[in-house]
Image (cartoon, coloured by chain):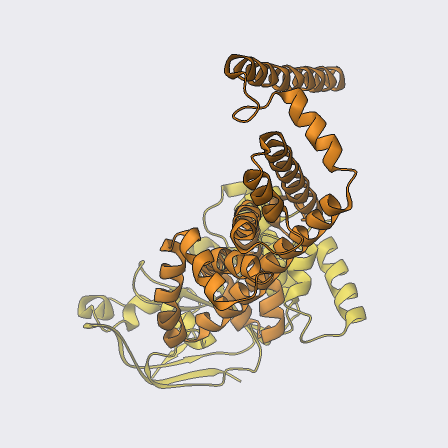
Amino acid sequence: MDMGRASKYKKRRIIYTILTVLFWLMVWQVASMIIRQSLYMPSPWETFVALSGLVITDIFWLSVAFTFLRVVLGVVISFALGILLAFLAMHSLFLMQLLRPVVAAAKATPVMSIIMLALVWFTSSFVPIFSCVLLCFPIFYTNTLAGLQSVDKQLLEMAAVFRVSRRRVITGIIVPSVIPHIYSALAVCLGFAWKSVVAAEVLSSPKYALGYQLYRTKLYLDTPSLFAWTLAIIVISLIFEKGLKRLLPQGGRL
Amino acid sequence: MSIRITNLTKRFGDHVLFENLNLELPAGQIVALTGRSGCGKTTLLRMIAGLDKDYTGTIAGIPDRISFMFQEDRLLPWYDARRNLEYVLKDVMDKEAIAAAVESMIEAVGLKGHEHKKPDELSGGMQRRVAMARAFLYPADLLIMDEPFKGFDVALTEELIALFERLYVGSGRTVLLVLHQPDIIARLQCAVVDVAALAASDGVQRDQHQLGPVENAQRE
């Protein structure tokens, strides 16, 4: 009975999803018919044609691969740096104070300023990674630090009475307390990482990059391709996000 | 070896909790600390356990290993009951010994079938039993318990006391516990220390100090 109800619910959700997609496609179609200029608003069909033309080219997959690599590198570096510095800051009030303005500044600085600065400092391929790190690192750092500060003092005291070794205090109490905070940082960062990397690629124009392709379409006023690339970016970043979330344990607990 | 507290003075800011306290707690039996709330029972336990070191004077005769059952259960929420028990043993026993000890303790405290549940999946009484099991499982000569039977209904309290008796019998350990109910004190044949009478802040209380049922803790 319950199973039947569950599958019925699932079916209904699928139908709603399809209807939603169709509805917005129709809105898009109507808008493009009213505007009647593919330079401003290409129709869904034109976009689809542009996209199907793109996916058979080498440059598309190379761009996807390189941008993907930059996002992964940016997130991994931010992740490692944020967690490492948070652990160190937890043991050194001086370091925490020292990092406070850096993190505050990184959080408040507009993404474009970061990208412009990176353009001055680095080669084109490294700019997107740097921008991504500067955007994501503070999130990992502050979340990990908040996690470390939220560790239950009563549990630490319990471990102290029972003379639990330092190593086991870390693996048994500290890490499980911090992990949910790191997961939520990861969830926030994934979206940020894609947006910042692509934006930086638009401006730094590395040879193989989704952002650079986006820039070229604008250069040639090829709006259907602009729509197609954008659609590709959205789909790939969604797949990336969903895939990573599936890899992580449910509920953020060990 | 008995626990000897000599010239202990403990303050919280301006408030003097104990002043030049001298006390000897006998070994190998159950010692109940009584006294109105706020008189310093928990503080005394914490100082003996080494969790509070902010005092002057000396506390001697503390064994190397101490087991502590806190007022709160203090179980690791991400581990199931079994892993909670194993957690405190891993640095003092080898794997086989832990497995055997934990298994027989799970049987003894009636957790069989529930050992893979996390604390939030266990009832309050069950959680308390895991906390008590952990305290007895840890190989310590001194067992400190802060109100182990507090906050449950009559039936559950009775269950916990019976469990305590089963686990304690023949262990020869020194147990130091905060306990209020005279009937339980009599039943467990505790030596009684009225902490309120030892406290520095209230002279009246000191004069009215009455001996407990089996008072054999010595005030020097």
Q: Is residue B58 above or below residue A131?
A: below
Measuring from the top left, give residue A58's x and y in whole percent.
77, 46
Residue drawn where x is 50% and y is 42% of the image: B154
Residue shown at the point (74%, 65%) measured from the top left: B101
Q: Is residue B220 above or below residue A233?
A: below
Q: Quadrant of residue B209?
A: bottom left
Q: Position of residue B187 (x, y in %)?
A: 52, 57
- In the displayed structure image, the side of residue A229 where residue A98 appears, left or right: left
In screen coordinates, is B206 left or right of A246? left
Q: Residue B3 at what x, y percent from top left?
A: 46, 82
Depth check, front residue: B150 or A243: A243
Q: Colour of chain B?
A: yellow
Q: Is residue A98 left or right of residue A14?
A: left
Could you tell me residue B59's position as x and y percent? 41, 84
Apparent colour of chain A: orange
Q: Is residue A220 visible?
A: yes
Which image quarter holds the N terminus of chain A?
Answer: top right
B110 shown above or below B2:
above
Query: Splitting the image into 4 quarters, where does residue A42 fall?
Result: top right
In front: A210, or A86? A210
Q: Residue farthest to the front? A: A220
Residue at figure coordinates x 49%, y 85% from the top left: B61
Figure check: B216 above or below A232? below
In this rendering, does residue B122 appear at all? Answer: no
